[in-house]
Amino acid sequence: LRHLVLVLGDQLDPEASGFDGFDPAQDAVWMAEVDDEASHVWSIQPRIAIFLAAMRHFAHALVKAGRTVHYTRLDGKGNRGSLAAELELAIRTHRPQGLVMTAPGEHRVLKALQAVAAAEGVPLEVREDRHFFCTVREFAAYARGRRQLRMEFFYREQRRRHGVLMDGDEPVGGQWNYDAENRAAFGRAGPGLVPAAPAFRPDPLTQGVLDLVAERFADRPGNLANFAWPVTRAQALDALADFISHRLADFGHWQDAMWPGEPWLWHSRLSAAMNLKLLHPREVVEAVEKAYRAGHVALASAEGLIRQILGWREYVRGIYWTRMPRYLELNALGAREPLPGFYWTGDTPMACLADAIGQTLEHGYAHHIQRLMVTGLYALLLGVEPQQVHAWYLAVYVDAVEWVELPNTLGMSQFGDGGLMGSKPYVATGRYIERMSAGSLCGRCRFKPAERLGDDACPFTTLYWDFLVRHEERLASNPRMTLQLRNLQRLDADERRRIAERSAAIRRGEVGA
Ligand code: FAD
């Protein structure tokens, strides 16, 4: 055997760089389903299922295309349980001259595979992942010498470099950013008729995976009864076409809005397909720009979506690979609280958290504002150790791969990196959730978002003030916090004491548990 080409669960593209020069006569593919990857964090059932189902479909397609695939099934006899142990066995069995792979999406996995290759004395060639607009090296060059990194400027450079939504040297429409036209909340009547999200009914192969996961991971949270994620390239393309035709037009406007019992709204639901590499982000960006140029959608919606993919998605990847492994340990605010147990059940009287966590465990999905301003915000205000928050986010979303999950969680949401991802902590009272859900969440909750003290006070609101008090000194030098801290001056010593007392009770689980 010349090359054994290693393919991980989030590298499911036959055109990936790992396959460059692949010769079916001399090379073979290696893929392994292992317990460790489902248990490194306490992955919920939908997350395990999407990876395994997509891997099995991909392996089938490779075999059909005439490639030899050495595939270890999770329930295969003698499965050694970890990628490293399985690779070691594969090297000893097939004796390849070399190993080849596309760069993985997680630092830990890269190190583990490199260690096996070194121990076995087989060269491992790690190739650039072409599923991004910007390489890690390019990002590092961009970041070097800049005192402050800001997504907005990185994004503009990406637009120019890749000629996305550009008229010559100028952004289409004359502006880079249309956020002012986006991010509305629904009226009291709610979202009205939400376009149905496409459901990809499990075929027999996927059903086999669902049965396996349900049995083997019966103790994990999550529900597979409604599993309908795209797990093949063809399904991913259908999901993209469906989004462009039915939801993109209103995406921008309702991007930040929330409504109970409506998990999808106008979101694309394409993150998992892109992260598994069933879909190239360039395909998504091109389809969105085309819909705009054809006059089917407004510029604000198209720009809003493209900013997320060409901007945020690339930016977080650059942060991850230029800051790991130290990034994983950061805890700028010294947060030490444990993650509340209800994050694994959704069993809490706080309606917004119950709703966001409930749909997360059911579908492995929540949209950005739910992740940032409901589950993320509560953990931040409570003072949960960012590593525990990270382990939760990595476990519960079908799109969770560490390169994208970690900077979003530890950085953007928990301010654990002290301001690299976002220039200030995203903190707000329960009023924010009330506004973005047009009162629909708070209306069904026993807590009052406008109150910071008393039995009915919303825990978000109490903890918001407590957060400002606890971090007043650190945040005082941040000009973006001036307004929020100025309001803190109005609190006298007695009120501060009562806020601290109630916050302590919340942390002890005596309120909101
Ligand atoms: P849409 O709202 O339709 O957005 C379109 C696309 O833009 C997404 O598919 C995604 O690829 C990209 N995107 C949007 N925001 C971001 C962002 N902040 N970073 C990177 N890409 C972005 N995204 C993941 O893909 N995996 C994760 O594990 C993940 N963890 C997150 C954790 C926290 C605490 C937060 C605040 C955000 C996280 N995100 C993560 C980003 C974002 O919430 C999801 O990409 C999005 O909700 C996925 O749903 P969608 O495909 O319907 O997205």
Image (cartoon, grey):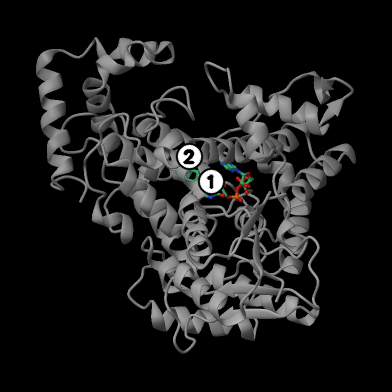
Badge 1: residue crowd in 10 Å (few <14, some 14–19, many ≥20) = many
Quarter assignment of residue 273: bottom right
Quarter assignment of residue 78: bottom left
Residue 128 appears anywhere in the view: yes
Q: Amino acid at mark 2?
A: Pro
Instruction: Identify the residue at image location x=33%, y=45%.
Output: 387
Q: Residue furthest bottom?
A: 77
* Foreground pick, 355 / 210: 210
Image spot of residue 392 (x, y percent): 37, 53
Instruction: Identify the residue at image location x=41%, y=64%.
Output: 43
Residue 226 appears anywhere in the view: no
Ligand 1 within 8 A of label 2's CB?
yes
SS label for mark 2: helix
Q: Is residue 299 above or below residue 367?
A: above
Instruction: Name the residue carrying label 1.
Output: 404
Ligand 1 within 8 A of label 1's CB?
yes
Relative horizontal placement of residue 139, taking residue 375 as reference (left or right): right
- Quarter holding the N terminus is bottom right
Disc 1 and disc 2: Cα gap in Å?
Answer: 6 Å
Relative horizontal placement of residue 279, taking residue 343 as reference (left or right): right
Badge 2: residue crowd in 10 Å (few <14, some 14–19, many ≥20) = many
Instruction: Identify the residue at image location x=79%, y=29%.
Output: 161
Quarter assignment of residue 104: bottom right
Give yes or no for contact between labels 1 and 2 (Cβ–Cβ under 8 Å).
Answer: yes
Q: Residue furthest front?
A: 121
SS label for mark 1: helix
Instruction: Name the residue carrying label 2.
Output: 407
Image spot of residue 470 (x, y percent): 22, 23
Image spot of residue 183 (x, y percent): 59, 33
* Foreground pick, 224 / 283: 283
